[in-house]
Image (spheres, grey):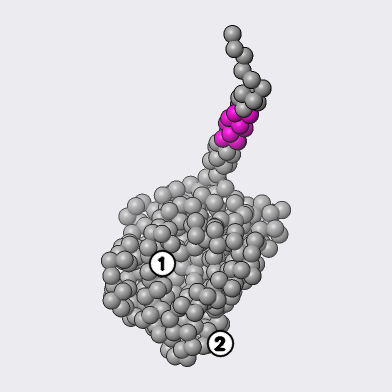
Amino acid sequence: MKFPGKKALLWGAAGTVTAGALASAGAVVAAGALLNRLRMADMDGKVVLITGGSRGLGFAIAREFASLRSRVVICARNNDELDRAAAELRRSGAEVLTVQCDVADQDQVTAMVSRVNEHFGQIDVLVNNAGIISVGPIESQTIEDFHQAMDVMFWGQVYTTLAVVPEMKRRRSGWIANISSIGGKISVPHLVPYSCAKFASVGLSEGLTAELAKDRIHVTTVVPGLMRTGSHINAYFKGDHKAEYSWFSLAATNPISSIGAGRAARSIVRAIRQGQAELVLGVPAKLAAAFHGILPSTTIRALGVVNRLMPGTGSENKERFLGRDSESTLSQSPLTSLGKRASRDLHQQPAVTR
């Protein structure tokens, strides 16, 4: 009878240990996933206020909360767009309140929160989603572009948050999600005003997460990469605006660099329900954030190379154009078909004025 040698015994033991370790790790991951599902907050009947909720990602989030039988409040600046979004949500059986509001105006925000409280009695969830974007080289950007970006995406979040937090603290319950961007982790060329505001949003959100935890208010910082929300047609473009729109629309609509709005909305709502502190959306965004965290100087130098390849560098044309007014042969090609579908599905096309 031949006995196994020492090497064979060692390899066998190692294989057994490895298999056991993998099985244990798998069990831990499965247990963690189950625990997360069990501890997800029930949103049935909860009042959810979503800024910028009439179209794009905000509308996708509203649909997701409506599917959980939440009472949904959407705000935007355009009443026709609000009516159109509310009509679709109500067809699915959702209870919806619309409020016309410019979140950059503190008085309007205060009035909106008062109206929601009068109508529903309280606000359980706040999703700070409203945004604005101006794409173009730094030479084409104006002080007003920086002011608008900060007013909507930083001060808009400050105003809404400070308006809802006192009542949440009194009840010792609440959820807040601040939609930032990978541009709030890494400043991207031709998006400097946008990135400045998103960096401020991340700072606000992370500070709130730490400060409000003692009051049982969960704050989630959402850091999406590019998403197929169709919002590119309503973004502003400067400098060589047609060339800027071409590269941006291609990046924001292809399935390699962008994720679908529905998938993003489901992930965001799940993160809110679990009280997750941060959610980075999309593989490219996760890789970019991780790489920048380890090698920030290398990332910045790489972006400098990317900037040399981008259109309109050095252009001082400060006039801005909507994406839908900046179409080119490339932006209208089949390569952007997923973006066109998203723009129709998420109400990015202009509402018909009554």
First along the sequence among labels 2 and 1: 2
Which residue bears the numbered disc 2?
143
Residue 71, horizontal then vertical, whole percent: 46, 54
* Number of numbered callouts drawn: 2
Mark 1 residue element = helix
Amino acid at circle 2? Ile
Q: Which residues are magenta?
A: 13-27
Amino acid at circle 1? Ala
**Is any atom of residue 55 visible in this view?**
no
Residue 344, horizontal then vertical, whole percent: 31, 65
* C-beta proximity under 8 Å, tags 2 and 1: no
Asked if 88 appears above or below 301 in the picture, the reply is: above
The stretch drawn in magenta includes residue 17: yes
Which residue bears the numbered disc 1?
252
Mark 2 residue element = helix
Q: Residues within 10 Å of mark 2 (few under 14, many from 20)?
A: few
Quadrant in which residue 329 is drawn: bottom left
Q: Say which of 255 and 93 sits in front.
A: 255
Tell me the quadrant of the picture where the N terminus can be found: top right
Residue 94, horizontal then vertical, whole percent: 39, 53
Asked if 311 appears above or below 28 in the picture, the reply is: below
